[in-house]
Structure formats: C-alpha cells, structure tokens
Image (tube, helix red, strand yellow):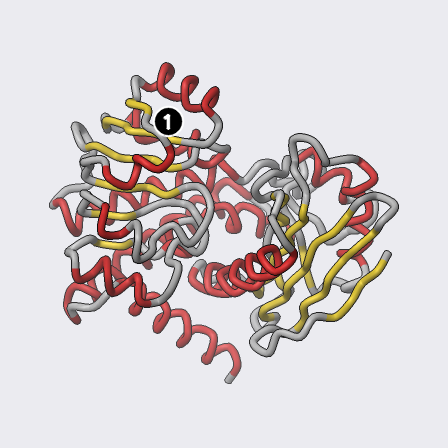
Amino acid sequence: MQITPVAAPEHEQVVRIADPESGLLGFIAIHSTRRGPAAGGVRMRPYAQEADALNDALRLSRGMTYKNAAAGLDLGGGKAVIMADPATQKTPDLLAAFGSAVETLAGRYWTAEDMGMTPADMARIGTRTTCVAGLADGDFASGDPSPITARGIFYAIRTAAKHRLGSVDLTGRTVAVQGLGHVGHYLCGYLHQAGANLIVTDIDRAQVARVAERYGATAVAPDAIYGVEADIFAPCAIGAILNAETIPQLKVRVVAGGANNQLATPEDATRLHDLGILYAPDYVANGGGIINVATEILKISGREAWVASRLAALDDTMDRILTRARILSVSPAEVADATVDEILQAKAA
C-alpha cells in the first residue's frame, strides 16, 4: 500500500492511495474535522485521469463539511474517490485495500456508501477498518442511505415549489429528473406518488426504460434534459452540471436535486438568479443520507425518530434560506454559504 500526502491548502489532509496488487488507486480528502470526524462516502468512477479524481475529492469533501454543518451534525467533511469502473473493476481485494487505507487515518475519516458502492461493499471495506458506516447489519447499522436522501430531496423540492410556484402541492407539476441511480430512482417514486409528471434521463438506457414504465415518465436523451419544459429540474447524477453552457438552456422555474456540487462555479448561482430560476442549495437538499449515516457513526439509538426529526429541521433550514434569499434578492447559494460559515465560526470559537 502506497499512501502519499497531497498538497491542498484549503484541506486538513489529502492522500493519494495506491495498491498495485489489488488495483486500488484513488484519493481520500479530509476538508475539516472542526465539528468532529470527517464523514463522507467513497465514490467509484472510471475517471479519465488522476487530476479529475483529485478535483472531485476536493470539491466533494468541502461540500460534506457544509452539508454536515447545515444538518447540525457533529461531523466534519471528508470524501474518498476510487478510480475504477464499479461494473467491471470492483473486487473484494480492492475494497479491502481501501479499508486498510481508511484505517491508517486513525478515525479522522469515516467512509460510507456513495456512487458506485453498495452496503455489501461497505461490509467488505469493514473487514479492514472500523471507520465505515452504511452497513446492513450491526447494532447501529444504518443500511442504504439512498431512500432517506431521496426523501430529503423530495422535501426540498416541495419547499422550493412553495417559494417559487406558490404551493407545496406537486399534483400536475412537471419535474425533470437527471440521473436514475439509487437516489434518483427513489425520488421518482416520491414524486410520482405526489402526482407529479416526470421527464427522466440517465446514461443507463435500461434503467431509463424501467423507470419510464414504472412511473409513466417521459424519457429523453441525456443532453436533452436541459432543454425540456418543466416546472422543476432535479439533478441527481454528477456535479458541475449547472454551468455557462447548460443554464441558458433551462426552461424551468426551480432547480432542486440530489447531485453534489451542482454549480460548476460560484458565478453559476448568479446566472440562475438572474434568470429567475430558484436554486435550492444542493448540500442542504441532499443532507438526508448523511443524517441517516450519522446515526451509525455517532451510535444514536432510536434511528427512525431521530432521522425524521433531523430531516424536518433540515427542511426548516431550507425554508429559512429561501426566505432570506428572497428578502435580500440574492441567490440562495449565497445565503446558504453565509449561514453555514456562521455555524462553523461559532464552533471554532
């Protein structure tokens, strides 16, 4: 196992992890432990090059600091990425090697499920480290966080709809969902049950067909999702999809989804605001998953009631952010960052 420090001035610790024997190659980024151990999932993707993987880890780990603080959790922010195709390159040895890498950080980073990973993978990682959550079995096991993440996003969509569309009632509203993985699929279920009309897309055509059939959704090509006419756009795939190229294509009044780091740059929040599109800050909207995982890391009893109360509090936070943004006539992203910065500064004091 080769663990090499990586310079990242805004982060507390970043390491490159490599184990040629198992094929493991990736990064673990600890952005902050100010509020507690850094917590954030491990993502497996076939990144084109190491620079892409590192940049993803840096952006995602910072996002986890803000997400955990916004949710009021005694956790810092961290993230791990593995450069591999989960469909063809994921092996027990690779997962075990990653667990060994996590263990070297001596509790500063707790890993959990993210894109390309499953509770079964967490169990395999857990054979080499105790700093893993999202397990299917155990005294405080929290399992797959995706349904809870989707529930929180659904709440955020309703709250954003209240602010921009005048009602939390989604009956007859059209929602364009980008990404139909675990979270996106569950979200479609909530939206369908609420009476929304769905337009969906994903790079996995078979999954698109399944979701379209199950929920009576309209399927479109991945690049076409930006230009569809809808009330709400719900990004639930990769980050940086809201940018100078895609934002002008949008024909929606609300953006509220589960993808991390949806804004490619801070200026993209202003672009949305200038177009009259209400943006529900992603790290507030998608905080349900880490709330669920936190019960395992922090060993909290009565998980369901605790999670429900935290989801309600997070929805209240979103409501306050959108209200203040309207009063100040600024982007909700600006208000959200300022709100969390105050939380982090208070903890430091």
Percent across and percent down for residue 342 are 40, 76
Residue drawn at point x = 79 percent, y = 55 percent: 18
**Residue at label 1?**
189
> Looking at the picture, which amino acid does disc 1 mark?
Gly
Q: Looking at the image, is 129 positioned above or below residue 187?
A: below
Q: Residues within 10 Å of mark 1 (few under 14, many from 20)?
A: some
Q: Nearer the viewer, residue 227 or 29?
A: 227
Specify the farthest residue to the bottom.
349
Specify the farthest residue to the left.
166
Q: Looking at the image, is 194 positioned above or below residue 102?
A: above
Secondary element at tag 1: helix
Percent across and percent down for residue 332 are 27, 62
Quarter residue 192 falls in: top left
Residue drawn at point x = 65 percent, y = 57 percent: 50
Q: How many marks?
A: 1
**Left or right of 285, for residue 123:** right
Q: Nearer the viewer, residue 164 or 266?
A: 266
Percent across and percent down for residue 218 are 28, 23
Residue drawn at point x = 73 percent, y = 62 percent: 16
Quarter residue 61 falls in: bottom right
Q: Nearer the viewer, residue 121 or 158?
A: 121
Percent across and percent down for residue 150 are 42, 38
**Image quarter hosting the N terminus:** bottom right
**Left or right of 104, for residue 84:** left
